[in-house]
Image (spheres, rainbow, N blue to C red):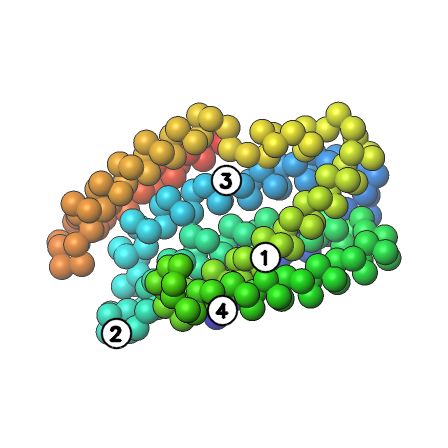
Amino acid sequence: MNYGSLVARIIFQPVEETLLLHWSRSLQAPATVPLLTLAVRLSSHLALLLPVFVPPLLPIVLPFLLPRRYTAETSAAQTLQTYLACYLPLLSLNGILEAFHAASATPAQVARQAKVMIASSGVFALSLWVLARGTVVSVTTEQALIYASCSAMLARIAYALVHARSVVRQQQPQSAFLRLGSVLPKWPVRIAVALLGGLVWAAAARLGDDDGPLRNKVLLLALGGGAGAIVLGLV
């Protein structure tokens, strides 16, 4: 998870800092709300794509990332899959919304956010306790930590989203950002992900055997790459 966090920060932190700098300098600019809408919309696509395409494709890529013995004897594969499919999309959305909050919040709103952060710690602890008991769902310790972190992050996202909608409503009451459909993947994208995702999952069941020939793995990766390209073309 530490390596995953490092990679995520390398990718997302420059984007978050760029957005924060832009919004801090020109919060009242006409382009502010459209930029926020676009950023949240792209993040919502991650939340759709990663849970669908990571599970069937990660086992093919994993041997190039981690030693075979390490993946066979530890829960590293499960942990990384959970991190990429669940935590990463939320991390992206949270970074965008908190950057907007940092650029637009009053001192009173910053103080309110601090209380939300404390509350999110409580959500984390409660979620971890429930998951550790194993009565709801059986997961590894590492997965429990990731899921608990996701629960805490959802609380922070909810607060930051309410704040963002409040600011946007004051600046541009007719903004598309206030309509849920404007920041979620369009129906053609959802249908394409469902169909192509099903195709990739079926191909993974047929070609993704660890002991299978390299050709099968290359074909599966090519199929996944092609499916991803088609979806991106629809975005």
Residue type marked 4: Trp
Q: Pointer 4 and pointer 3: residues touching (CB < 8 Å)?
A: no
Q: How many marks?
A: 4
Disc number lying in front (4 or 3): 4
Disc number lying in front (3 or 1): 1
Q: Residue furthest front?
A: 135
- Where is mark 2, residue-wise? 73
- Where is mark 1, residue-wise? 153
Residue type marked 2: Glu
Query: On residue 129, which mark appears?
Result: 4
Q: Pointer 2 and pointer 4: residues touching (CB < 8 Å)?
A: no
Q: Pointer 1 and pointer 2: residues touching (CB < 8 Å)?
A: no
Q: Tell me if 109 is positioned left or right of 45 in this view.
A: right
Q: Quadrant of the N terminus?
A: bottom left
Mark 1 and mark 2: Cα distance apart in space:
30 Å
Tell me the residue at 29%/37% (across/down).
Answer: 198
Q: What percent of the width, then of the height, locates residue 33?
A: 73, 36
Q: Pointer 1 and pointer 4: residues touching (CB < 8 Å)?
A: no
Q: Tell me if 154 is positioned left or right of 64 in this view.
A: right
